[in-house]
Image (cartoon, grey):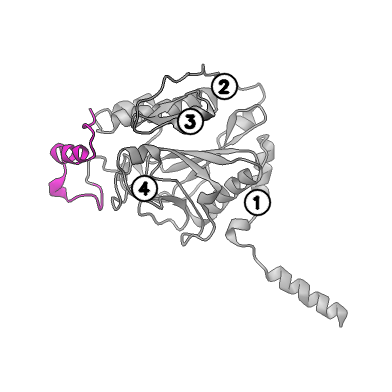
Amino acid sequence: MAAAAMSSLLISCAKIELAPHLRPLTNDTMMLLGKKGMHAQAPIFIRIYKEESELEVWKLRDDGRYYHFKTYPICTWSGGLGPKLREGDRQAPEGFYTITREQMNPDSQFHLAFNLGFPNAYDKALRRTGDALMVHGRCSSAGCYAMTDALIEEIYALAREAFVGGQDSFQVHAYPFRMTDANMARHAKSEWHAFWRTLKEGHDYFELTRQVPTIAICNRRYVVNVGMSAADAVKLNAEAACPAFHRPQPTPFSPKPGEQIAQSHVIVPGVKKRTAASIETDAPRSGLTKAAETGPAWWNRMLSSFGRPSPK
């Protein structure tokens, strides 16, 4: 009888399935981490590219530099190129965002999710509104970046392990496209070009150093690569003039010989419902305005209502 009871218990335990947010990284993922010289609980950094519908995960190695782990396809996202402006515009955000433990959502109706933290101090300084802008599963978006369930499980697990390892928060840098000079030139006439130049500073700093830049928000703008004390950081005001920052000299990244595997870019295959060809950069945003209300005059009126000049 005891043996039968034990057998029944083992069968019952075998049927228990871990909740998605608790599932361990797969053996294949752990093997790739090992091959790339990465610890599962090392800090992470994420970059998002709208036009290419891609999300990159980078992991910190023992040399203090970040190395590419995987590029994941973004199943879908909503809106067009450019930042989110207000509640209901169905626009996925662009900018520099910080993710803390509290922003991880294991009970999301979209399988798993983490909140980007929109609006951050920069967005608030420009009177931008909206909330609950996520990276999540279910491949359905109304202003978010949506992955397939399987991919968000892995990304969520990588973030979870980084928090377990002691990372207090991680950065997500969301870009309109890969920030090459050619792409910037291609979009030179966009009203958001000046904003994108600032985003490119953060992108280029990481490309040069493989370190995440310190970013301050003051005078209603992002300032990339600043040095400041903890006391100065507390006093920083997103709407006030910027202090005289110390700008540390970047130390370029120099790969060591024999690091081909660590340097390799692993691209995960998968569904991308949004492609460059499907993005109409000059089209009115869904839910933001009627077609008759678009154009330079409308934008000038809207920006004036925010108390700031039109972008040049």
**Marks 1/2: CA distance?**
30 Å
- In the rendered image, residue 62, in percent from the top left (x then y), is placed at 67, 30
Single out the mark in the foreground, 1 or 2: 2
Q: Is label 3 in contact with label 1 (beta carbons under 8 Å)? A: no
Q: Residue at x 29, y 44 (%)?
A: 85
Q: Is label 4 in contact with label 3 (beta carbons under 8 Å)? A: no
The type of residue carrying mark 1 is Thr
The type of residue carrying mark 3 is Ala
Whether residue 19 is visible here, answered yes or no, is yes
Q: Residue at x 83, y 80 (%)?
A: 4
Disc number at residue 253?
2
Position of 111 relative to 84 (above/below): below
Q: Residue at x 53, y 50 (%)?
A: 102
Q: Nearer the viewer, residue 293 or 121?
A: 121
Label 1 vs 2, first from the N-terminus: 1
**Marks 4/3: CA distance?**
38 Å
**Marks 2/4: CA distance?**
33 Å
**Marks 3/2: CA distance?**
27 Å
**Marks 4/1: CA distance?**
28 Å
Q: Is residue 168 left or right of residue 244?
A: right
The type of residue carrying mark 4 is Arg
Q: Nearer the viewer, residue 186 or 304?
A: 304
Q: Is residue 91 left or right of residue 139?
A: left
Q: Nearer the viewer, residue 257 or 173?
A: 173
Disc number at residue 233?
3
